[in-house]
Amino acid sequence: MEPVVPLDDAAPAHGGKAAALGVLRRAGLPVPDGFVVPASLDGDGLVAAVDGALDTLGRHAPVAVRSSASDEDGARASAAGQYATVLGAVGTDRVVEAVRACRASAAGPRATAYRSATSGLHTPADVSVVVQRLVDARAAGVLFTGDGRAVVEASWGLGESVVQGAVGPDRWTVADGRVVEHRTGDKRTRVDRARTGPGAGTTTRDVPASERDRPCLDDDTVLRLAALGQRVADLRGGPQDVEWAVDDAGTVWLLQARPVTAALPEPPAERGGRADVLRGTGASGGRASGPARVVHGPDGFAAVQPGDVLVCRETDPAWTPLFGVVAAVVTETGGLLSHAAIVARELRLPAVLGVPAATDVLRDAPTVTVDGDTGTVATP
């Protein structure tokens, strides 16, 4: 039974996420300190090992607990959001519980459906778990490198708002060392570390109206992020999907790096045409038609039929089992770099995100045509 491993020593045997973070730390990049709980470590040995390892991070310091499965963060399949993550865990009992939740998620509906769709495999993967000091983020998000540019999406607080597709994030495109495009999103909620309560965790609250349409990063920080992203790509040998956070002191931290498994769609040409066409962000290319199926939550999953166009407010990773059933996806919030958008591109499922009032406008529409290349949704 292998003991816990310092993050600096993480290797491919500890899963893709841990191995990548080990590479970044050994290169001197700003990655929060932590350790890896190997897949083989369990029982009383798990409790004792976690208890001892937490002393290195601060016994009562909040930590992030993330899966590092053997089939996660690969070159062809990211498994983005398909395994459990627990943020803000405090104390041995809560961290051990979080480690076990990460492992159990390998057999959950999300990971099972994703594994079947991408590889045809049905056996749960081995799951090592990364435990890191939690960054109290002023702003956080995701960046993609590749094709001579970096695309950055961000929102206030922890990055869960961005990866879960819960907000319309701010977006920047960087090329040739400068910001060439910027769009300010609609950031209505934020996720932060809970300060009180047993085992702590996170809390979600409304963003003040004055902050919702104010950029959460300045251009200098965006350029620093893009430069760090390129260093990661150089180290890792190809375009990267990087999760990051900026703390209150303005320090940029790298939280995760994995290969980009499916390229971002090309920005559409200037869009004209019909005034009644709904417009959003083309997150996954292709074109498909079908009846609109408005779903407000998991209770509505059973009503979804093969060939439907899934229409919802947001698609957090719990919704991705539907991606193997529906013809296309339309949401009211979310960005290009959310977990659901990544999975849609991997499965070649047309998706348009950030369509205002889609659940009202498209309700009961007998036929909807979704064009993920142009970012448009049309009804006859």
Image (cartoon, rainbow, N blue to C red):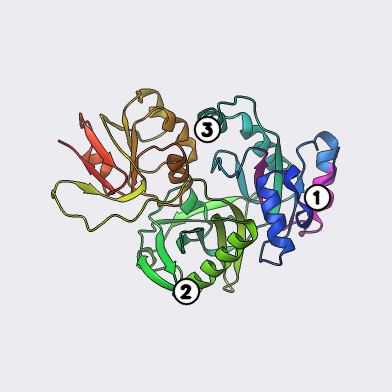
SS for tag 1? strand
Q: Nearer the viewer, residue 153 or 318?
A: 153
**Residue topped by disc 2:** 177
SS for tag 2? loop
Nearer the observer: mark 3 or 1; the answer is: 3
Residue 268 in which image quadrant: bottom left
**Residue topped by disc 3:** 118
Assess whether mark 1 and mark 2 are in contact (beta carbons under 8 angstroms): no
Q: Nearer the viewer, residue 330 or 155?
A: 330
| Amino acid residing under circle 2 | Gly
Q: Residue at x 75, y 42 (%)?
A: 13
In the image, 330: left or right of 324? left
Rendering coords of residue 232 (x, y %): 61, 61
**Residue topped by disc 1:** 5
Question: Are there few (<14), some (14-19), or many (20+) residues within 10 Å of tag 2?
Answer: few
Q: Residue at x 42, y 41 (%)?
A: 315
| Amino acid residing under circle 3 | Thr
SS for tag 3? helix
In the image, 247: left or right of 332? right
Residue 61 drawn in magenta: yes
In the image, 217: left or right of 330? right
Rendering coords of residue 311 (x, y %): 32, 37
Question: Are there few (<14), some (14-19), or many (20+) residues within 10 Å of tag 3?
Answer: some
Nearer the observer: mark 2 or 1; the answer is: 2
In the picture, the quarter occupied by the N terminus is top right
